[in-house]
Amino acid sequence: MRWFLGLTTIRNFKKKFKKIIKRIFMRIVEIKEIIRKDVPIYYRRLYSSVLVMELMNKIIERKIDFSIEAKPTGQKDILVTIAEPIDYPLVPLLRELKKFINEIDSDGQLPPL
């Protein structure tokens, strides 16, 4: 039984350690200069903007394009395209970007048409 509890605490430690490391190395500061593009499809919204992020204690700005598409079930499908290369793994960056975009969309901070 003790070895099982040890594995559980080791797994919890690894999860917490990964979260701490991710916060130290990469943090999304803001998305600025958000411009909505005109699209004839009413359930899709396209935006172009500038991503400001802190990467290893340096502030980096990159151009991004993202779209928010409303599905018939009420869910939002967010697609993000980064126009310039970033020296950071894309999968965790895109995951955090989608969360951030979803938050600012639900707060009503995205510009209307």
Image: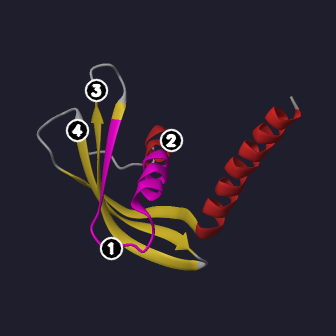
The numbered mark at residue 85 is 1
63 or 7: which is nearer to us?
A: 7
Give the mark nearest the N terminus, 3 or 1: 3
Question: In screen coordinates, is 102 left or right of 37?
Answer: right
Mark on residue 71?
Answer: 3
Foreground disc of the pair 3, 1: 1
Q: How far apart are labels 4 and 3 at the CA level?
A: 9 Å
Magenta-colored span: 77-100
Whole-number angstrom distance, CA of label 1 to CA of label 2? 29 Å
Q: Is residue 41 left or right of residue 36?
A: left
Which residue position is annotated with label 2?
Answer: 107
Mark before the other along the chain sequence, 4 or 3: 4
The secondary structure type at the circle numbered 2 is: loop
Name the front one of labels 4 and 3: 3
Q: Which colour scheme is used?
A: secondary structure
Give the distance between the C-alpha atoms of the residues marked 3 and 1, in whole angstroms.
30 Å
Residue type (three-letter) at the residue carrying disc 3:
Lys
**Residue at point 61% right, 61% down?**
22
**Image coordinates for residue 104, horizontal then vertical, percent:** 48, 47
